[in-house]
Image: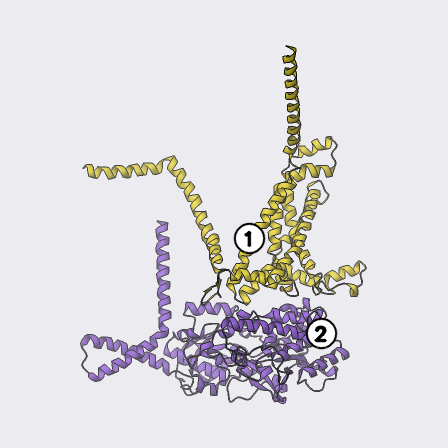
Chain colours: A purple, B yellow
Amino acid sequence: MNLKKVTAVTLAAATALSLAACGSSSSGTSTAASSAAADTEAASSEAASSEAASSEAATSEASESSDASASGDITWDSVTLGETGTDLNVEIKLLTHRTDMMADDYAGKNWNAYLEEFNKMYPGITVNIEAITDYANDSLLRLQAGGWGDIMMIPAVDKADLPTYFISYGDSDTLGKEVNYINNFVYQGQAYGIPSTANANGIVYNKKVFEEAGITELPKTPDEFIADLQKIKDNTDAIPLYTNYAAGWTMGAWDAYISGTATGDPDYMNYKMIHTANPFAKNADDENTYPYAVYKILYDAVANGLIEDDYTTTDWEGCKGMINNGEIGCMVLGSWAVTQMQGAGPNADDIGYMPFPITVNGKQYASAGPDYNFGISAEVSDDEKLASMIFVKWFTLDSGFSYNEGGLPIAADDTNSPDLYQPFTDAGVEYVADNPAPDDEADLPNEMNSESELAVNAGGNEKVQSIVEHAFNGDEDFDSIMDEWNQKWSDAQDSLGVEIKY
Amino acid sequence: MANAGSPAKSRKSFREITQTRKFQRTAIIIGFTVIPLFLLFLFTYLPFGEMVGFSFFKMKYVGKRTFVGWNNYKSIFRRDDIFSSLILSLYYMAGAVIQIAVALYLATVLSMKVRFGKLFKAVIFFPYLINGIAMGFIFKFFYTHGFVLDTVLSWAGFNIDSLPYWLRDQRINNWALVYASFWRYVGQNMVLFIGAIMSIDPSLYEAAAIDGANKFQQFKYIILPGIQTIVTLNIILSITGSLSAFEGPYVITSGANGTGTYFVVMDRIAHTDQKVGLASAMAVFLLLIIFACTIAQKLIFKYAFRNAQTDDESYAARKQRRKAEKQAAKELKALKKAQKEAR
């Protein structure tokens, strides 16, 4: 009896699941199929000689195709804020990772404040917000289960799956002129994500410590930087450069500086580096640029004793208060870290952000990239899609969210960077967003990281930690570390059959 | 009618069969073995078999797989990082030997009448109850320069500036980590030993005491042979544990600075570098090492405990007896010969 019941339930569940799987996997292709059907339908209706049965089928097809074309019309361009959809009366749901913004006592502007503003323009659209703590994992599960809502921060899905789950905002080339940093979720020329905010890579520093050390001008080259660190060591009690070695990922964060920041080339990270022979070698034109220079800064800082005393027991949470109180000169971290350092003590005004000290042909660059992107569900009704599109567009263009959160502007015509980036503006820094790998080599960067075991920008913390170890123990000079990495990179290129072009 | 009758009869006989004691016993035996065996197969041997299969492929978690034969196994021997991580296990093995010796000593002392014995047992066992991750954080602060350990040592008269950096100095950082694992597991070993010592008949001690045996002799001739199986078990567990040391180095130093044990390296290769095939091969290789260690250890014990066993006494006696018998037979022969001659 029980066994039968269990079997029956299991079978039912299995069937339901497999059905659901069919449904979700086929929906990606259904738009194409139904539009094809619409074409033939149109042809046949012109002929006007359809039998009763086929006309019945045709009408159902026609209604389906009109659905498809209608949803196809909801794009970024079709929405004019304040005009489109003002009569809409729908409720939509947004999934977000920003749990902190749910709280009333959030230091910045919280979700409710944004929604209030939005509802002044669109009183009919009610936005419900659900914040998820373990967002990266939970959102993936919710996405696959379906019925999660209307807008979400796109989690780590394969590009090929994007059309299954999300609607396109429009052609990536046209959209790219209006919105920055959309590259991460472009598939077959369509953009499926709009960044909520964007970050740039520089160095978090304590202005007061720099002042006390007698540094009047921010460093622009590795040599100047090392000299400044030495000044901090000589003239103050602060730790010049705090490596956060023990946390691991804080060391892997150095990888973020080797692409746009050190080269000024948006194609370097995902294309040129893959095809470069010995990318970690000294650059022939200027040894103070390219990956070599980035890691050399770290090596030299350690070798000259310009870092914390006991790097193996550093404490990530503790470092925030230390830099706030002027016990640390600077740390190499993304701009997202700035607000945390400011909030960790009473001296928020002392925390500043400066460009990474590498100058390529007389110009400084900074890698910039998007934070989480908004995606709009493909499985909700047209009204909900339209309302979602309106909300995302408003949030991007009118809410000032990115600015409030200390991010770079998302709208292309917005030049209003937060004060944080004043040193970047002063130094004439150009922001560089990495281009994605070409479609036919989309997996190659990951393959190279795996094969070479260097895991650049992919959790390769250990290799950067080893720089600190060797520099401190003095058992290996910098060039031979780089030679080892080059060897690993070349071996990986050989085994994957990568063509050397540079 | 006959046709209709026979199935009824056989159905009845089937029900009869199911009601016999013999059938029920067989059914229960099968039921109780098949289900656990099935679960064991499903969750242990099947995944293991899969993993052995993976070890012959070059693969990631997703994406295509290429068959590479023994290449993954070959690269275990070619790569410096894997082999040096195995050498690190020697630190942990040395630690394990000391750990067992200390646990045995504490267990022996605490199984005798000691004041506050229960308190000591609880205090020594307590670290084992702490979560391994929490323990990692405790020791990170414990070893931080100028923190817990250094402060305590400075009370004892050491100058803080002359103390080493426990985790930074590559000559001592592995010993520091081994101590963390010692601290955690010595209590568990001790409790196992105490349990075994408790099962020894107390009258043996009395008898030995009457015969004038001191405490050390009691330990050597009563306790040690009595808990031999538990000693063996603890040694096997400790050796396996030292080969697969993970939590300590992973949490305290994240395997950096020359503290990456075999498991930490395996974790990095499997997850960061996504070389699932190589990591699987490493796991299979580790299993073989553990097999080898276990067998070697069994053989050594067979040899080492031979003299301590009670039947060795009779072995000597038997030798003597045989000698005596031979002598007796010789004498008998000689006697018979003499009798013959006399006749």
Callout in the foreground (2, 1): 1
Q: Which residue is mark 2?
A: A303
Question: Which quadrant of the view contains residue A30?
Answer: bottom left
Say what secondary structure mark 1 lies in.
Answer: helix
Say what secondary structure mark 2 lies in.
Answer: helix
Q: Residues within 10 Å of mark 2 (few under 14, many from 20)?
A: many
Residue A443 visible in the displayed image: yes
Q: Amino acid at mark 2?
A: Ala
Q: Which residue is mark 1?
A: B288
Q: Is residue A120 above or below residue B285?
A: below
How far is disc 2 from disc 1 in space, using C-alphas?
A: 42 Å
Residue A331 visible in the displayed image: no
Q: Is residue A376 above or below residue B157?
A: below
Label 2 marks a residue whose chain is A
Q: Is residue B252 above or below residue B22?
A: below
- Residue A116: x, y in percent? 49, 80
Q: Are marks 2 and 1 in contact (CB under 8 Å)?
A: no
A95 left or right of B330 in image? left
- Residue A424: x, y in percent? 61, 86
Label 1 marks a residue whose chain is B
- Residue B335: x, y in percent? 65, 16
Residue A22 bears which disc, if any?
A: none
Question: Which quadrant of the view contains residue A369?
Answer: bottom right
Q: Amino acid at mark 1?
A: Leu
- Toward the viewer: A60 or B5? B5
Q: Quadrant of the C terminus of chain B?
A: top right
| Residue at the outermost top position | B343
A14 left or right of A227 in image? left
Question: Which quadrant of the view contains residue A226?
Answer: bottom right
Q: Is residue A59 above or below residue A139?
A: below
